[in-house]
Amino acid sequence: MVAHNRYREAIPSGENVIVDTEIGQLREAGVDVVPFQRSSDSIGSLSLAGKALLPISPVYGAEAQHDLAALLAAEKPDALHLHNPYPLLSPWVIRTAHAHGVPVVQTVHNYRQVCSSGLYFRDGHNCQDCRGKMLGWPAIKNRCYRGSAAQSAIMATTLAVHRPTWRSVDRYIALTDKIAAHLADYGIPDDRIVIKPNGLPDPGAPAPLGEGFLYGARLSPEKGLGLLLDAWRRHPDGSLGTLRIAGDGELRPLAEQADRDRSDVTYLGPLDRAGMTAARRDSAVVIAVPTWEDVLPTVILEAMSTGRAVLGTAVGGIPYMVGTGPDAAGWLAEPDPAALAAALPLARAGAPAAAVAARARYQQHFHPDVLTPRLISIYEDMSRHAHK
C-alpha cells in the first residue's frame, strides 16, 4: 500500500511525479499496489466539519485513520510505503498500520522530521535553528509553515508529538547520503536506513543536442533564480547562447525583467510536462542551482535521462546525482555568483561530451531496471524482519 498526501496540482511537484512513477514501475514488475492518497486540492471542498478539524489533521487526521484502517483490514498488505503525510494523512498512519501488523517504510523527500517547512531554509538563507530542540519554537517565531504563526505552532507541535512515531518506522529510504546523515542525526539506527535514489522511466534514445541553457523550477528564492541571473549578467549579452527560464512563483518579475533586459534570456512562463520536454530538447545544458540543501531534484533526473548535461550547485543531493570525475553528468559550482559565472562557459563548451556521460549515469544509477528490484528487496527484507 502506497500512502501519499498529494501536493496541489497548481504547484509543480516532483514528489507527486515520483510517487506516480514508482507505483507504475512496481505494477510493471508484478507487484500489487493499493494507493491510499489524499490531495491538498480537496481542502477547498471539505465540509464545514472537515474544515473545522483541518488545523489538527497534521497531528491526527481522524477521517484518514478511519479510511486507512478499513482499507488495511480489507487488503491485508505486506507493507505500507509512506511518502508525504501532510496535512491530511498525518504521521498517525504509521501507528494505524502498526496496529494492523503492517510494517512501514518511508521515503524521506525533505527534512520535515525536524524542520516545519521541510527545507532547512528561511528568509533567504539555510537554517537549522530547530535542530535538536524538543519543540521547534524558532519555526513558530519565524512563521516558517505557510507564513502563519498559528499553523507553524501546529506543525511544530506535530513534529514534537510524533517524534516517537517517526522513530518506530521499520525502514527509511534515504534518497542520498545527505538524507541518511539527517536521519542518523535524528536518532534513527543505521540498520533501519537504506540509501536508494528516485528514478524515472526511460524516455528512450536522446534527441540531438539543442543549444544554450534551460532553467526550469518554481520561481522562489531557495531555487536560485537570483543567483543564476547574477552569474549570467557577468557575461556579455549573447556570449553564452540562450538562457531559457521556465516556471512561476514569487520571483517571476525577475525572470520577466531579465527577458526584457537581455536578448539572450527568454522567459517561457509556466510549462506543463510536454512544454518542459520540448524546452529540454531545444537546450544543451539544464541548470539546477538551488541555494537550499535540495534533496534530489527531479529536474536533474529528467535532464540525465534525456541525455542533457547538468550544471548544478554543490548542495544537498546534487553532488550525489551529478557525480565527479570524467564520468560526471556535468559540473558543480558553489552557490556563489562568481563561481557559477566561471562554470557557465565550461558547461557551454563541454556540453556534448557531458551529455553522453549524463545519459550513461542515468542508465547505471537511476534507471527503473536498477531501482525497482532494489525497492522490492527493501520491502522483502523489512517484512522478514518485521515478522520475526
Image (spheres, helix red, strand yellow):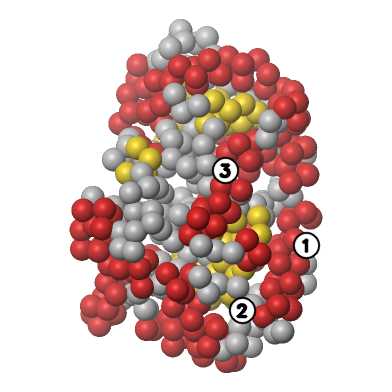
Residue 372 x, y percent position in the rendering: 74, 60
The residue labelled by disc 3 is 317
Query: Earlier along the polypeptide chain: callout 3 or callout 2?
Result: 2
Residue 225 x, y percent position in the rendering: 41, 31
Query: Earlier along the polypeptide chain: callout 3 or callout 1?
Result: 3
Q: Quadrant of residue 318?
A: top right
The residue labelled by disc 2 is 103
Q: Please, is residue 129 above or below residue 19 in the view? A: above
Position of 32 with respect to 154 (left or right) is: right
Q: Amino acid at mark 3?
A: Gly
The residue drawn where x is 68% and y is 35% is 323
Tag 2, which secondary structure?
Answer: loop
Q: Amino acid at mark 1?
A: Pro
Q: Quadrant of residue 358?
A: top right
Q: Quadrant of residue 163?
A: bottom left
Is any atom of residue 372 visible in this view?
yes
The residue labelled by disc 1 is 373
Dot 2 surroundings within 10 Å: few (below 14), some, or many (20 or more)?
many
Q: Are marks 3 and 1 in contact (CB under 8 Å)?
A: no
Q: Are marks 3 and 2 in contact (CB under 8 Å)?
A: no
Residue 302 x, y percent position in the rendering: 62, 42
Q: CA distance from mark 3 to mark 1?
A: 22 Å
Q: Amino acid at mark 2?
A: Pro
